Image: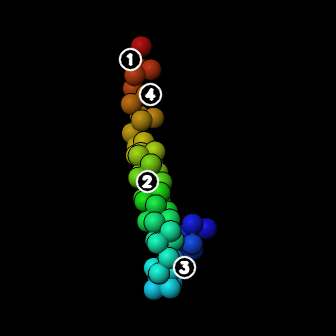
Amino acid sequence: MFYATDKFLDENSAVLGTVPALVAATLEFQANIKALEAATEKQVIDITGFAKDKAEAEDAM
């Protein structure tokens, strides 16, 4: 949903750019989107091989 809002803001930047409060809100909104994307990247990790390592550790015990 917020990507659609961001697209709308980009498409109408000429009109919205005349209102300083909307310009500031748009910049803050876009910064928040980038922060959400960065947080998502940190949470998504590659877990390939964890089960194999766990099984090998259990066998070693």
Q: Is residue 14 above or below residue 27?
A: below
**Sequence-wise, which precedes: disc 1 or disc 2?**
2
**Sequence-wise, which precedes: disc 1 or disc 3?**
3
Q: Amino acid at mark 2?
A: Ala
CA separation in Å, label 4 and label 1: 9 Å
Secondary element under disc 2, as helix, strand or loop, is helix
Pointer 3: what residue?
Answer: 8
Q: Nearer the viewer, residue 50 or 30?
A: 30
Pointer 2: what residue?
Answer: 35
Quadrant hosting residue 14: bottom left
Quadrant hosting residue 47: top left
Nearer the camera: disc 3 or disc 4: 3
| Quarter of the figure with the C terminus | top left
Q: Amino acid at mark 1?
A: Ala
CA separation in Å, label 4 and label 2: 37 Å
Do callouts 3 and 4 mark residues in contact (Cβ within 8 Å)? no
Do callouts 1 and 3 mark residues in contact (Cβ within 8 Å)? no
Q: Would you call the spot at circle 2 few (<14 residues within 10 Å), some (14-19), or many (20 or more)?
A: few
Pointer 1: what residue?
Answer: 60
Nearer the camera: disc 4 or disc 2: 2
- Work out which residue is located at the far top of the displayed protein and give it: 61
CA separation in Å, label 3 and label 2: 20 Å
Do callouts 3 and 2 mark residues in contact (Cβ within 8 Å)? no
Residue ID at (38%, 17%): 60
Regarding residue 7, the answer to whether it shows in the image is: no
CA separation in Å, label 1 and label 2: 42 Å
Pointer 4: what residue?
Answer: 55
CA separation in Å, label 3 and label 4: 50 Å
Q: Amino acid at mark 3?
A: Phe
| Quarter of the figure with the N terminus | bottom right
Q: Nearer the viewer, residue 4 or 52?
A: 4
